[in-house]
Image (cartoon, coloured by chain):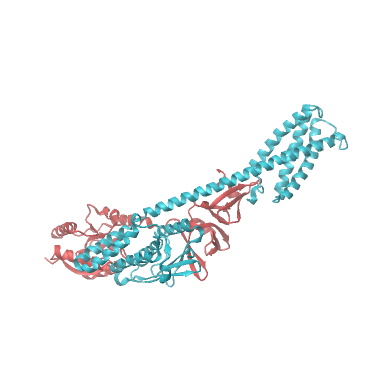
Chain colours: A red, B cyan
């Protein structure tokens, strides 16, 4: 029987050293055939050495540990290592993939080793159809980061580009192919037509009141209605009054 | 509130007309009581017509000319009273089946009465309007104040509840744990840095104010920790002149920006990068810049929370005078600039 080989993948040097010394102590026969500092390096290393086991840190620059696992499924056993993403790795509870929480303890690592040794001794092949569970874990991991409504605007300012949070925008005004962004501090231009912008803004916060005007509802201080049915909106921090066109006046009807 | 009367609303019109009808009825009763005119029915019809006519002309005049100055407003109302009385009297006389003669003595009496009562009612309306406007203004101020207080309380609460990022906590502890075996001295020094960071990061153990110098010491400790963790991938430089280190400064304003630069800028970048913090005094403002050469801004990433907290705290601490500016750094990364007023000492 050939000796068992493993790779260690973590972006932090000290943590690789630590895991290596723990493995040396608890599983002296294991050969650590290589270490990688990010997902890309890990793929190359695994391709080259064909290890039996990969210890994968989840959060790494470039490709994450989860993405590496998805690509090497079936070729080796995976043990995830994470500082805090318990909610993501819990998906692997009772599955063929194991996980360790940082800081790694002797006891927990021993348990993982025993499990791996059993699987390898029984000549079980590493699972190759885990992609669905991994996809779910990835979704859980990056749930908060999926792009929703637009939150920042890149506006030209002097010769640099400034980032303005949309929450600070009082209103948007169409200006040909561009859109004028008006805040408490002044105005700037973005290279995006107002129609396009309207689709990216949260409709609960940004209300279209005219073909060429979108206001931030949080800034509305007063809405008045004249005899002719014309609506006029006054905004906080801005001196001007904005006209509401007939087709949008219904927004304010319930008020 | 210049636009108080400019925008006459439907409620405005309805209310004015109802009051007018009420007053007119009262006038008709009084006139009948003093035996003026032909009897209650005639007096009622004519006074209603005159009143409603004056009211309509006055509202139309105010709507068309939108007078802002009180004098101009008075002129518009006076003209409306005169025209309104004549027109109302003619219509009323037709309705009541009375002869219309402009040269009759009765007409002059009606004119005098119309102008008299018209003026009284107009004065009543303008008085009411002034009161309701000032009430609205007071109400608006109150709402503004309450909203402000609420916002401040929320900002404070978020600030107090600000947590230590769990990844940072456990990764740091893992590093310390491993150093205790491998390199005891480095392990001790990392633990010391971590304690220094915790003292300021845990709300209950930090003071209300600190100085820029103390805040920089804490950031130095925080960066030392990351230097151990990221190794060659992180380079950093702090350039804060000694002269501004003594200035008082709110705690945990710079730190979230440094944390943001590391977490979203440098840590996710394969080759890592540099962090540069510099400060200067510009007139009566203090300007601090936190510059990184990391990933730069990426829409959709979870970068907003820390930054909007800093923004809100600047707003509640300095009103409009303190601000946070974010710019793209060239050739890569992000530049965060904090500007706060500095009380001349």
In percent of the image, x 24 and y 66: which residue is there? B188
Which x, y percent locates residue B341?
A: 49, 63
- What percent of the width, then of the height, locates residue A194? 54, 59
Is residue B24 at all visible to an observer of this figure? yes
In x, y percent, where is residue A124? 17, 58
Residue closest to the eye, A60 or B156: B156
Q: Nearer the viewer, residue B326 or A41?
A: B326
**As rendered, which of B177 and B239 lies closer to the eye?**
B239
Marker count (numbered): 0
- Residue B70 percent across, percent down from the top left: 71, 49
In the displayed orientation, state which residue is furthest to the front: B345
- Residue A175 drawn above or below residue B20: below
Asked whether residue A67 appears in the rendered view, the answer is no
**Side of B89 relative to A119 (left or right):** right
Residue at 74%, 44% (x, y): give it. Answer: B77
Q: Please tell me whether residue B48 is drawn above or below residue A13 in the rendered image.
A: above
Question: In the drawing, does residue B265 fall left or right of residue A18?
Answer: right
Residue A142 appears in which quarter of the rendering? bottom left
Residue extending furthest left? A1
């Amino acid at each position: 029987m050939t000796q068992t080989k493993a790779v260690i993948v973590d972006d932090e040097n000290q943590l690789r050293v630590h895991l290596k010394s723990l493995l040396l102590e608890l599983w002296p026969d294991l050969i650590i055939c290589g270490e990688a500092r990010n997902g890309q390096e890990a793929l190359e290393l695994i391709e080259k050495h064909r290890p039996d086991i990969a210890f994968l840190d989840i959060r790494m620059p470039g490709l994450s540990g989860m993405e590496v696992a998805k690509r090497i499924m079936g070729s080796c056993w995976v043990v995830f290592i994470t500082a805090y993403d318990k909610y993501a790795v819990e998906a692997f509870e009772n599955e063929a993939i194991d996980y360790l929480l940082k800081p790694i303890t002797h006891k927990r690592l021993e348990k993982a080793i025993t499990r791996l040794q059993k699987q390898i001794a029984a000549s079980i092949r590493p699972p190759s159809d885990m992609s669905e569970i991994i996809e779910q874990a990835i979704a859980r991991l990056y749930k908060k980061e999926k792009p929703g409504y637009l939150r920042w605007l890149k506006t030209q300012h002097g010769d640099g580009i400034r980032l303005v949070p949309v929450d600070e925008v009082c209103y948007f005004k169409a200006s040909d192919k561009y859109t004028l962004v008006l805040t408490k501090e002044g105005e700037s231009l973005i290279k995006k037509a107002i129609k396009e912008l309207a689709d990216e803004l949260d409709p609960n916060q940004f209300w279209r009141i005219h073909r060429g005007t979108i206001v931030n509802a949080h800034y509305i201080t007063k809405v008045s209605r004249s005899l002719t049915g014309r609506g006029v909106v006054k905004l906080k921090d801005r001196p001007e009054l904005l006209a509401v066109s007939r087709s949008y006046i219904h927004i304010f009807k319930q008020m | 509130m210049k636009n108080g009367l400019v925008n006459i609303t439907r409620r405005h019109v309805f209310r004015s007309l109802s009051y007018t009808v009420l007053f007119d009825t009262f006038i008709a009763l009084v006139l009948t009581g003093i035996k003026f005119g032909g009897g209650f029915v005639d007096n009622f019809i004519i006074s209603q017509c005159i009143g409603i006519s004056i009211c309509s002309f006055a509202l139309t005049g105010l709507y068309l000319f939108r007078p802002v100055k009180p004098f101009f407003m008075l002129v518009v109302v006076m003209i409306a009273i005169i025209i309104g009385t004549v027109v109302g009297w003619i219509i009323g006389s037709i309705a009541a089946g009375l002869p219309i003669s402009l040269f009759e003595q009765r007409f002059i009496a009606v004119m005098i009465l119309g102008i008299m009562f018209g003026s009284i009612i107009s004065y009543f309306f303008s008085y009411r309007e002034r009161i309701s406007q000032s009430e609205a203004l007071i109400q608006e101020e109150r709402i503004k104040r309450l909203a402000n207080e609420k916002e401040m309380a929320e900002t404070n609460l978020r600030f107090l509840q600000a947590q230590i990022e769990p990844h940072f906590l456990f990764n740091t502890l893992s590093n310390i744990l491993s150093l205790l075996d491998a390199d005891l001295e480095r392990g001790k020094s990392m633990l010391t840095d971590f304690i220094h960071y915790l003292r300021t990061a845990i709300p209950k153990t930090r003071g209300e104010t600190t100085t820029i110098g103390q805040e920089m010491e804490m950031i130095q400790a925080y960066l030392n920790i990351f230097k151990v963790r990221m190794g060659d991938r992180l380079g950093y430089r702090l350039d804060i002149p000694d002269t501004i280190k003594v200035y008082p400064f709110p705690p945990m304003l710079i730190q979230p920006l440094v944390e943001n630069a590391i977490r979203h800028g440098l840590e996710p970048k394969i080759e890592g990068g540099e962090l540069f913090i510099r400060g200067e005094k510009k007139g009566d403002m203090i300007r601090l810049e936190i510059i990184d050469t990391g990933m730069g801004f990426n829409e959709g990433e979870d970068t907003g929370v820390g930054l909007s907290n800093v923004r809100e705290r600047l707003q509640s601490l300095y009103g409009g005078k303190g601000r946070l500016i974010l710019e793209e750094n060239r050739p890569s990364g992000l530049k965060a600039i904090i500007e706060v007023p500095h009380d001349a000492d």
